[in-house]
Amino acid sequence: MAKMVSERADVLPALAEVFREHGFEGASLSLISQRTRLGKGSLYHFFPGGKEEMASAVLEQIDAWFTATVFRPLREATEPMRAIDGMLQAVDDYFQSGGRVCLIGAFALGDTRDRFAQQIRSYFATWSTVLAEALMRLGRNDEVARNLAEDTLASIQGSLVLTRALNDPHVFQRTLRQLKARLVA
């Protein structure tokens, strides 16, 4: 049964989960309609550009969350270590201890990458840059900080995949603990 939705933003969490579970190509309008409980007409009212606009809006929402919760604190922190701790906690919460797929990472791996290349690139580049800058404020030289930031993102993304593949949340939690030790060292 269709339901009343007052704003486009109300639909985004359900859309995100459909894309996480089925990928861009597998997220049919029928499935999206079923999960959001909106008719196709309502979906096109909120997203005239169809599924591509839906996915873009979801990526924008994810980016906004990371900007507010992770990127801005890392960029503006007077205490970089506190911001790094906050980043690791936010990542653990957001990805539900490894139980939730990184949609931007998933889009980066598939054919969808080219459609959303700018959003995907911006997300990872921003995260890497602001983390490296925080590490430099902790006294790391430029090259070490940039390499450590990239290694951190690679570890987070890889542990999300491995956690899902093994169905073992301890992999993600252990990775975050190890990252904290490396970032503080």
Image: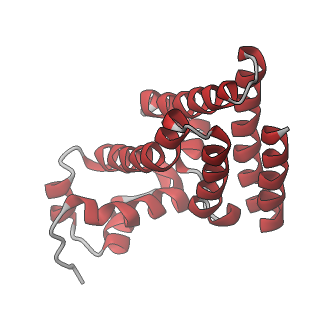
Figure colour scheme: secondary structure
Where does residue 127 sit, x and y in percent of width and height? 57, 34
Residue at horizontal 21 percent and vertical 64 percent from the top: 40
Residue at horizontal 53 percent and vertical 45 percent from the top: 70
Residue 111 quadrant: top right
Nearer-the-camera pick, 97 or 24: 97
Residue 104 horizontal side relative to residue 148, left or right: left
Residue 62 visible in the displayed image = yes
The quadrant in which the N terminus is found is: bottom left
The quadrant in which the C terminus is found is: top right
Q: Is residue 51 above or below residue 135?
A: below
Residue at horizontal 48 percent and vertical 50 percent from the top: 69
Residue 81 horizontal side relative to residue 22, left or right: right
Count of all numbered marks drawn on residues in the image: 0
Seen as rendered, the residue at the extreme bottom is 1
Residue 91 horizontal side relative to residue 146, left or right: left
Where does residue 172 sit, x and y in percent of width and height? 77, 58
Where does residue 24 sit, x and y in percent of width and height? 46, 49
Nearer-the-camera pick, 154 or 126: 126
Q: Is residue 56 above or below residue 45?
A: above
Residue 168 visible in the displayed image = no
Where does residue 3 sit, x and y in percent of width and height? 20, 79
Residue at horizontal 22 percent and vertical 43 percent from the top: 49
Nearer-the-camera pick, 54 or 72: 72
